[in-house]
Amino acid sequence: MATRTRRDGAHLQAGLLAVAAAAGIAALWLVVPVGTLWLLTRLSGDAAVILITGLVVMPLALAAVAWMLAAANRRYLRLVGSRGGWRRGPLEVALPASIMIGIVTALIWFVFFANHMPTGREQLIP
């Protein structure tokens, strides 16, 4: 009985880690960049300082979140275990999917919603 309870607890932990990985991926693409820029605007009023500092701080913050996501993925794989073959974690499925969703969303926005049509006052060829 104790083994069954331990395995059930492991599956619950694995499920929570999968949900945390999905939330972490959203944080990787949305919260970290916006939060970094928001924090930098609170610390400095100079746009050049914000830009230069952001070019240094943002990749470090993204790397920290990516490291945490990789640790959660490794923990998930340890909890679920190997069943005689190669096993995928939630990060290996959700991260490429989020990248594809982001690219498709950006293309839809650019093609249908971006205001990139000339108004007649601009020169198309300089």
Image (cartoon, grey):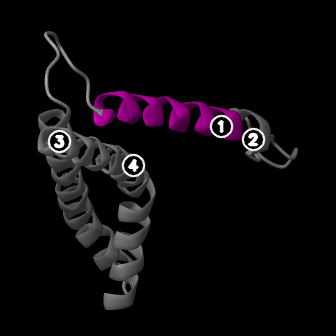
Looking at the image, tell me whether mark 1 or mark 3 is earlier in sequence order: 3
- Viewer-proximal residue among 7 and 115: 7
Which residue does the numbered mark 3 point to in the structure image?
1
Residue in view at x 41 percent, y 53 percent? 23
In the structure shown, which secondary structural element does the residue marked by tag 2 occupy? loop
Q: Quadrant of the C terminus?
A: top right
Residue in view at x 29 percent, y 29 percent? 92
Looking at the image, tell me whether mark 4 or mark 1 is earlier in sequence order: 4
As measured in the structure, the alpha-carbon distance from the residue carrying label 4 to the one carrying label 1 is: 52 Å
Q: Is residue 119 left or right of residue 85?
A: right
Looking at the image, tell me whether mark 2 or mark 3 is earlier in sequence order: 3
Amino acid type at circle 1 is Pro
Q: Is residue 12 above or below residue 65?
A: above
- Viewer-proximal residue among 85 and 39: 85
- Residue 48 x, y percent position in the rendering: 33, 75
Which residue does the numbered mark 1 point to in the structure image?
126
Q: Is residue 87 above or below residue 69?
A: above
- Residue 123: mark in rendering: 2
Looking at the image, tell me whether mark 3 or mark 4 is earlier in sequence order: 3
Spot the residue most to the right: 120
> In which quadrant of the rendered view does residue 118 lie?
top right
- Residue 19: mark in rendering: 4
Q: Which residues are magenta?
A: 90-109
- Residue 75 x, y percent position in the rendering: 14, 43
- Disc 2 + disc 1, Cβ < 8 Å: yes
